[in-house]
Amino acid sequence: MMKPDVKVVILGDMNVGKSSLLQRYTERRFQSTASTVGGAFFLKQWGQHSVSIWDTAGREQFHGLGSMYCRGASAVILTYDVTNRQSLRELEERFLILTDSARPDCLFVMVGNKSDLTEEWTETDGTEGEGATPAPPAPRAAKQVFREDAINLYKQLIKSKMLNEQDFPVAEKMCFETSAKTGSNVDLLFETVFELVVAGIGKKPAKPSDTVELRDRNSKPSKSPCCT
């Protein structure tokens, strides 16, 4: 049994690419994956600290589990699809309330995935990481969610939780656009989160731990025992 020092949770509607983002970062590859059932986690050693990353199900029948997975979270990655405006609305309408069980000093990160599918994507956007996939030869879809939309939602979230903006990173630093397929900005996303949550260890008193118990599976994603 290994208890992580900090916990990171990925939330978002189904088909926004949450599992693909985690797979790209942890396994340096991309493939179409089946929907996550319940939740899965990965343990990452970052310096002297252990970080657990929870990948949660976006399907509505598993929605109630999200609050449980968010308990004691030090960071929540709120994920949407840049080609699907509704996926951002779903974050606001269904998922933000689940973060009420996270730590009082929880960091929030906005991530627009599937940037490689938009008309704005060009070859100069490049790829990132070993095994990254070259950019597609032609645009595939109109972009429906822009970075400014994510920045506005981030600011609304901080305000709605009555948090002091001065205690948290500025919105522009916490809003990313990624491509799990090509690897663009995926490393930057996770490593920024790890740096911030590890830097916050010991700075603020933590509330009593009531996080979901984890089982170490040799640092590979694993299904939650409560959802099998």
Image (cartoon, rainbow, N blue to C red):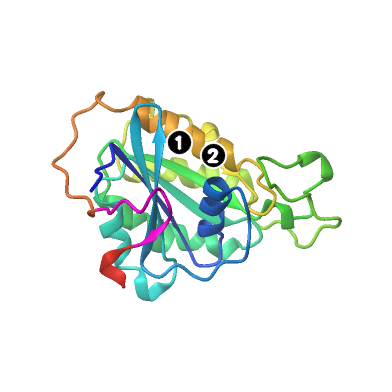
**Is 66 left or right of 72, judged from the image as shown?**
right
Which residue position holds label 2?
A: 189
Look at 28% across and 36% down and name the residue there: 5
Task: List x then y, in percent, for residue 190.
Answer: 50, 39
The residue most toward the left is 208
Q: Quadrant of the C terminus?
A: bottom left
- Residue 219: say if magenta: yes
- Residue 15: say if magenta: no
Name the element at disc 2: helix
Task: List x then y, in percent, for residue 119.
Answer: 79, 54
The answer for how far apart the CA atoms under marks 1 and 2 are is: 6 Å
Is 14 rendered above or below residue 49? below
Label 1 amino acid? Answer: Val
Give, as a single range, the part of the protein colored magenta.
214-223
Task: List x then y, in percent, for residue 173.
Answer: 53, 32
Is residue 203 at all visible to an observer of this figure? yes
Which numbered dot is residue 82? none
Name the element at disc 1: helix
Principal secondary structure, stretch drawn in magenta: loop
Label 2 amino acid? Answer: Leu
Which numbered dot is residue 193? 1
Q: For residue 2, which quarter of the picture? A: top left
In the image, 114 versus 94, the foreground residue is 114
